[in-house]
């Protein structure tokens, strides 16, 4: 009888105990399972935020959406949107990638109030745009972007943000070649950072090959061939 009472008491306690993010929760990411109820303690940049659990902190990135970078048109609106939606709220996530090339956990984040995807809402309101390569043209995000384009919202007011960013990043080849040997943190030098975190300088045979992105302040492992950031000026 005593054992039965103890069992019932333990069961009731477990039912009313608040769920928290734990290492065991994150172990579920391999099966793409949902991790529930956590709080965001800090917004780093649009779509990037820190989650605090009992004894550790994790930095995450919203899946399938890209936002304007600092100094680009729409950045302030994007950071304000992220803060207003994520701070002081309750959420659950679906882990898409344990860690990306920037060591961020990639998640589809859902607002518990309406069980609405943060990424989809940002795309639909023109705060950011759909990263089709990352999602494989995920249907709901595709439709959200079509709606945003038709209404000419946010980032679409000044044209296609993807095309504008690409044009801004492209530099004439002779100029790129002339940059080799300069201060690695020159404001005009664009490095190529692969999805595996390898940093290549302009002129390197691996520059702009494969998947990656340009960066003026790259983080990762320097290429052994061209020296990456570590290469000294002549």
Image: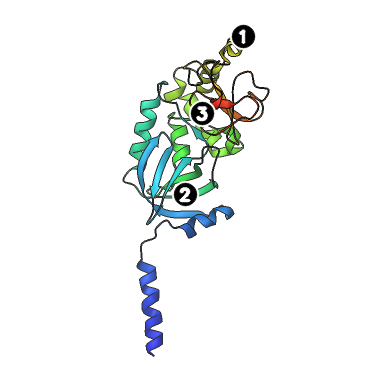
Residue topped by disc 3: 218
In the rendered structure, the answer to whether residue 227 lies left or right of residue 118 reads right
**Residue 196 placed where, x, y %?**
60, 36
Q: For marks 3 and 2, give the one nearer the viewer.
A: 3
Badge 2: residue crowd in 10 Å (few <14, some 14–19, many ≥20): many
Residue topped by disc 1: 174
Q: Quadrant of residue 173?
A: top right
SS at mark 1 in the image: helix
The mark that comes first in sequence, 3 or 1, is: 1
- Alpha-carbon distance for marks 3 and 1? 22 Å
- Alpha-carbon distance for marks 3 and 2? 28 Å
131, above or below 155, in the image = below
Badge 1: residue crowd in 10 Å (few <14, some 14–19, many ≥20): few
Q: Residue at x 47, y 40 (%)?
A: 61
Residue topped by disc 2: 93
Identify the residue at the far right of this view.
205
Q: Which quadrant of the figure contains the N terminus?
A: bottom left
SS at mark 2 in the image: strand
128, above or below 179, in the image = below
Q: Residue at x 53, y 57 (%)?
A: 27
């Amino acid at each position: 009888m005593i054992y039965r009472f103890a069992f019932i008491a333990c069961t009731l306690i477990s039912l009313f105990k608040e769920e928290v993010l734990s290492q065991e929760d994150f172990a579920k990411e391999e099966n793409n399972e949902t991790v529930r109820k956590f709080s965001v303690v800090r917004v780093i940049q649009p779509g990037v935020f820190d989650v605090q659990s009992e004894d550790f902190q994790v930095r995450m990135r919203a899946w399938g959406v890209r936002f304007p970078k600092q100094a680009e048109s729409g950045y302030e609106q994007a950071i304000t949107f992220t803060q207003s939606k994520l701070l002081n709220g309750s959420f659950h996530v679906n882990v898409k990638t344990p860690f990306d090339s920037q060591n961020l956990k990639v998640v589809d984040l859902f607002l518990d109030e309406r069980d609405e995807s943060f990424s989809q809402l940002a795309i639909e309101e023109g705060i950011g745009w759909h990263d089709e390569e990352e999602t494989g043209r995920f249907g709901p995000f595709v439709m959200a972007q079509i709606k945003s384009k038709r209404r000419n919202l946010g980032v679409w007011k000044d044209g296609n943000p993807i095309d504008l960013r690409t044009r801004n990043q492209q530099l004439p080849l002779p100029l790129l070649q002339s940059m080799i040997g300069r201060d690695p943190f020159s404001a005009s030098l664009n490095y190529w950072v692969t999805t595996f975190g390898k940093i290549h300088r302009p002129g390197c045979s691996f520059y702009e090959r494969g998947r990656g992105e340009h960066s003026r302040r790259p983080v990762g492992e320097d290429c052994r061939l061209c020296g990456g950031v570590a290469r000294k000026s002549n």
